[in-house]
Amino acid sequence: MMKKRIILVALALGFVPACASAAALAPPVAAACTGCHRSGGDPALPQLAGRPANDIVAAMDAFRSGKRPATVMDRIAKGYSDDEIAAIATWYSAQR
Amino acid sequence: MNARTKTRRQVLHGAAGAAAAVALWPRPSAAQAAPHIVIIGGGFAGATCARALREADEKLAITLVEARRTYTAPPFSNAVLGGLRDLTSQQFSYDKIAGAGITVKIDTATGIDPQARNVTLSNGDKLPYDRLVLAPGVDLRFDAIPGYDEAASAQVPHAWTTDGTQFDLLRSQLEAMADGGLVAIVSPVNPARCPPAPYERASMIAHYLKTKKPHSKVVILDAKDSFVMQSLFQNAWQKLYPDILEWKSLSSGGNVASVDVAKKTIETDFDTYQFAVANVIPPQKAGKVAALAGVTDRTGWCPIDPVTFESLQQKNIHVIGDAALAGAMPKAAFAATVEGKLCAAAILSLLAGKAPVPAKLVSNCYSLVAPGYAISTTSINHPVNGQYVDVEGSGGISPLDAPPAYRAEEAKFADAWFRTNTAEIFG
């Protein structure tokens, strides 16, 4: 399971830079995150930019499975596929 | 790119003529005019879209048209009515947006020509556009409730738009009210902006009455038989405001037949309510600039393609925020922000001749029931057959049996979200 996820992240990493040159905008699948998890935002809502991709994937997995207690992130994480989570993780890990 | 771009360039060349006579040769930047995106409406949707476009492409010409110099944010405004916040903490200027390289025009659009692709402002200026984004929010249907027109709202506030004076009026009426009075809230049918907000508002007013005027009551006169997060609200009300807050559903006589602002009465199908303070939230439709552009359908809302946010009725015009209609899109500030970003991405793709990528529309809407006690509803939508639908198994509402610590955590996150999101837009 974990190995598959790492491969997905690697694939997404290979894919993103080609797109990133076109625009500095987050890919649509990752557009919603910074409304809460913005760089320099509220400490209660940790920023995603610059966090290791695997940490983001692991957190989203834990929210989705219910392993990590949450208020809304469990409800949100269930709306994303593995590929989408990988793309989100890849994008934000490459941001500062 | 096409005939339309050429026309616009010709216009620009004409305008540049005088400058060229002085400069003797055209400046390189004038040789290739950047596309011009005009956005009407500077709320969560429109202002976010402007900033996302600016962030993504420094060459684009971006104009944001907004009627009010000061924006009064609707989320959390109920806490102002409850006495927990100052109205100023809801208010934002467009200075930073203008400073970011977006042309801000404090004005209203009086005409839109989708064929010629231009917007006419009230001062007579014409703004040519390559793409127009409408984010007009909602307009109130002042013809829907007999006795409640725009003039009546100067005495009985709706406090439902981004007009800050309406919140000041309602708050000052609550403060001036003698203990023992009745506060009546008239709640509208859906679709309406932020469906949980009338119930959050009732909660916040009940909190104020409980702590400051304990012999007073608040009644919700509802045009509906059910509402979002109903069991969460009702459980909280039973615990917190059992003798203060009453909800009258449509079928239990909540439907309002008329309002008399002079006599301070509200007639329902069965009763007459004598109120000390009333708050009438009329039914709604898309903000009027949408009708001007010809993007509203017979419902009064604006059907759009969920991937591009382009109107199904007019090409090159996109509609985002509360005015837009495409299935399960929530009319919420959180969703409006996401729509602003997705619409920006779609416009950039279209300008580049690429197919816009379908995305997920996330919304998370908090309601404050009491200080340190919030509940929320979350949705993740994706486009299926031209409509937004819920992603199966995702989203939902706060648990019914959550402990106080969970409600407190949600209240903390609600506050953090508001500060973070408004900083992203207006900061």
Image (spheres, coloured by chain):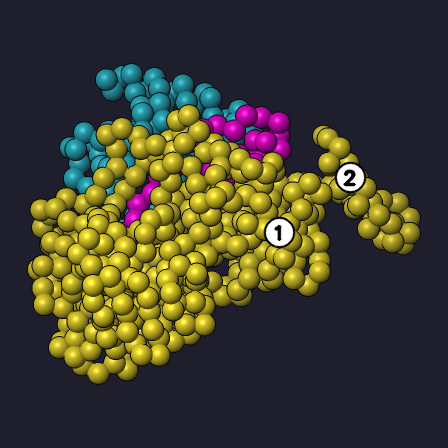
- The percent position of residue B13, horizontal first and vertical second, equals 82, 45
The subunit letter for the residue under badge 1 reads: B
Q: At 16% across and 50% down in the image, what residue appears?
A: B232
Taking depth in this image into account, of B21 and B319 the one nearest to the observer is B319
Quadrant in the rendering for residue A3: top left
Q: Is residue B211 visible?
A: no
Dot 2 amino acid type: Thr
Dot 1 amino acid type: Thr
Q: Is residue B32 above or below residue B357?
A: below
- The residue at which mark 1 appears reads as B63
What shade does chain B have? yellow
Please give the label number shown on residue B7.
2
- The percent position of residue A20, horizontal first and vertical second, equals 52, 30
The subunit letter for the residue under badge 2 reads: B
Taking depth in this image into account, of B276 and B93 the one nearest to the observer is B276
Q: Is residue B263 above or below residue B134?
A: below
Q: At 35% across and 75% down in the image, what residue appears?
A: B261
- The percent position of residue B350, horizontal first and vertical second, equals 59, 31
Which chain is depicted cyan? Answer: A
Provide the secondary structure element on which disc 1 rests.
strand
Q: CA distance from mark 1 to mark 2?
A: 19 Å
Q: At 53% across and 64% down in the image, what residue appears?
A: B68
> Magenta residues, as a range?
B341-366
Mark 2 Cα-neighbour bin, 10 Å: few <14, some 14–19, many ≥20 = few
Which quadrant of the figure contains the N terminus of chain B?
top right
Provide the secondary structure element on which disc 2 rests.
helix
